[in-house]
């Protein structure tokens, strides 16, 4: 097996760099020469710098089991969790994978279990559910074989996350509640983990249409996260608590939480999350009737997402822009926004956003007097919402279609949709 120095030299030559070029302005040619000959060992910080310049993960240059590789594992794991918080799931998967390759059998059960569970988390967000479950099962096996039982909190959380992202919402709720029970029973010290677990439980109730229960769990999450000064997760909870308050009709409380989230994301200089907060604020202001303010926030969100290359996020902002422009009466601009939202959503196969775009098209066509086109879009939205289990959206679509048909003197056609609205709402209340 080649040594660290030999690997550095081979990669440097592969890239056509001189020793001076590799050293840059802060490492001398002589030092690089000594490292390549095995006469000097770089610190982990220096090796991370060299790995970046050589365009390879640090694990590429290390022998598994070495003292330096143990430090590199800890660095890779910590940076992977940061990538998870920032929503860069591809990078997180790469770093957890790197940590696993470096650790082999020389790290503790807990370290390797954490790597597997972290990798499962990243893969779940990337919608690679089968591979996520394989890594989850590997991590759970290590925990059950003698690791820290508190790791079972993370096992439950990842199980819930996979189910939630795969839209198996009842199963997700069960796993999140089990995780929180374990969190309390074991006295888990990571309040931030408890907070994100409750945040996702709140998200599950939001998707189930129970905004009161969602608000309850978001507040519990806020109580756990506030003492940790974990500003990322604190901002996330404020956004979703704002959304839950909006859905309950309390616009002032919603705006207060969303304003706090915007401030936190500005402090963190996290443009991706700031764009999300702007979009949520725009939706809230639109619901309150402040159309021009809503458009300002939605357009700010869109500019951010265009700048960072977030095409799925652009699609969501364009959908909201189309909705707001429809309300304002700028129908031609609304149509252009929805055409682009459609194009991006088809590219990423986002069924949930595609269903919401159908609703936006329905409202646009109804506003333009194209009733039959509007009916067709509503019907496609209803079919999609039902298949996705989006019950609140389903009830809204049925209600709006029924009202549209009544408005155009078609009561016999409207009746089934209005009756269906009541059935869905009753089922949700009972549920």
Image: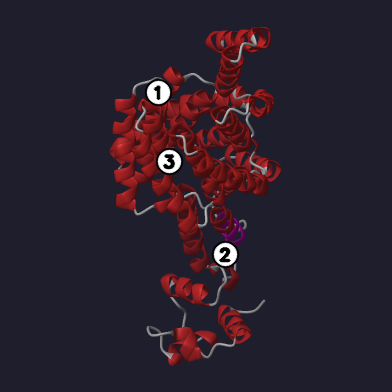
* Spatial separation of the CA atoms under disc 1 and disc 2: 47 Å
Image quadrant for the C terminus? top right
Q: Which image quadrant for residue 359?
A: top right
**Mark nearer the viewer, 3 or 2:** 3
Residue 405 vs residue 129, the one in the foreground: 405
What residue is shown at x 52% (from left), y 40% (from top)? 334
Q: Position of residue 7 (x, y in %)?
A: 60, 79
Identify which residue is drawn at 40% across, 20% down: 248
State the residue position of label 1. 215
Please rate how many residues cluster around mark 3, counting C-alpha atoms within 10 Å: few if below 14, some from 14 to 19, many from 20: many
Q: Which residue is mark 3?
A: 279
Vertical relation: 215 (above or below) 348: above
Look at the image and say whether residue 100 sits in the magenta stretch: yes
Q: Secondary structure at mark 1?
A: helix
| Res. 89 in view | yes
Residue drawn at x 56%, y 13% is 428
Camera-side residue of 37 and 25: 25
Tell me the SS state at disc 3: helix
Residue, disc 2: 65
Q: Is residue 29 above or below residue 184?
A: below
Foreground residue, 53 or 409?
A: 409
The reply to whether discs 3 and 2 touch (Cβ–Cβ < 8 Å) is no
- Callout 2 secondary element: loop
* Residue range (magenta): 96-102
């Amino acid at each position: 097996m080649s040594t660290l120095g030999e690997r550095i030299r081979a990669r440097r030559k592969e890239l056509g760099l001189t020793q001076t070029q590799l050293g840059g302005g802060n490492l001398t040619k002589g030092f690089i020469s000594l490292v390549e000959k095995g006469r000097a060992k770089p610190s982990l910080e220096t090796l991370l710098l060299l790995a970046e310049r050589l365009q390879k993960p640090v694990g590429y240059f290390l022998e598994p089991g070495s003292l330096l590789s143990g430090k590199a594992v800890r660095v890779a794991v910590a940076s992977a969790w940061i990538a998870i918080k920032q929503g860069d799931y591809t990078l997180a998967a790469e770093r957890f994978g790197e940590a696993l390759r470096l650790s082999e059998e020389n790290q503790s059960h807990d370290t390797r279990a954490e790597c597997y569970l972290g990798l499962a988390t990243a893969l779940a967000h990337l919608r690679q559910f089968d591979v996520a479950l394989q890594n989850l099962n590997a991590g759970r096996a290590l925990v059950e074989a003698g690791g820290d039982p508190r790791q079972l909190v993370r096992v439950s959380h990842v199980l819930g996350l996979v189910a939630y992202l795969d839209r198996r919402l009842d199963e997700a709720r069960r796993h999140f509640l089990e995780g929180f029970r374990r969190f309390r029973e074991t006295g888990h010290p990571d309040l931030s983990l408890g907070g994100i677990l409750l945040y996702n439980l709140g998200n599950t109730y939001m998707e189930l249409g129970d905004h009161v229960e969602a608000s309850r769990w978001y507040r519990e999450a806020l109580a756990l996260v506030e003492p940790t000064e974990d500003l990322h997760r604190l901002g996330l909870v404020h956004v979703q608590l704002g959304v839950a308050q909006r859905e309950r009709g309390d616009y002032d409380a919603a705006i207060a939480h969303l304003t706090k989230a915007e401030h936190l994301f500005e402090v963190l200089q996290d443009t991706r999350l700031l764009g999300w907060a702007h979009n949520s604020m725009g939706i809230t202001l639109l619901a309150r009737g402040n159309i021009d303010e809503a458009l300002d926030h939605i357009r700010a969100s869109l500019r951010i997402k265009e700048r960072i290359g977030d095409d799925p996020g652009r699609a969501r902002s364009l959908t909201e822009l189309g909705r707001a422009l429809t309300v304002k009466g700028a129908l031609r601009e609304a149509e252009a926004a929805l055409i682009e939202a459609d194009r991006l959503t088809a590219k990423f196969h986002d069924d949930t956003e595609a269903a919401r775009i159908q609703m936006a098209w329905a409202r646009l066509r109804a506003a333009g007097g194209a009733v039959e086109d509007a009916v067709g879009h509503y019907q496609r939205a209803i079919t999609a919402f039902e298949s996705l289990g989006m019950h609140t959206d389903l009830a809204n679509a049925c209600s709006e279609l029924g009202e549209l048909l009544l408005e155009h003197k078609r009561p016999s056609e409207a009746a089934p949709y209005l009756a269906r609205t009541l059935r869905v709402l009753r089922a949700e209340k009972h549920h």
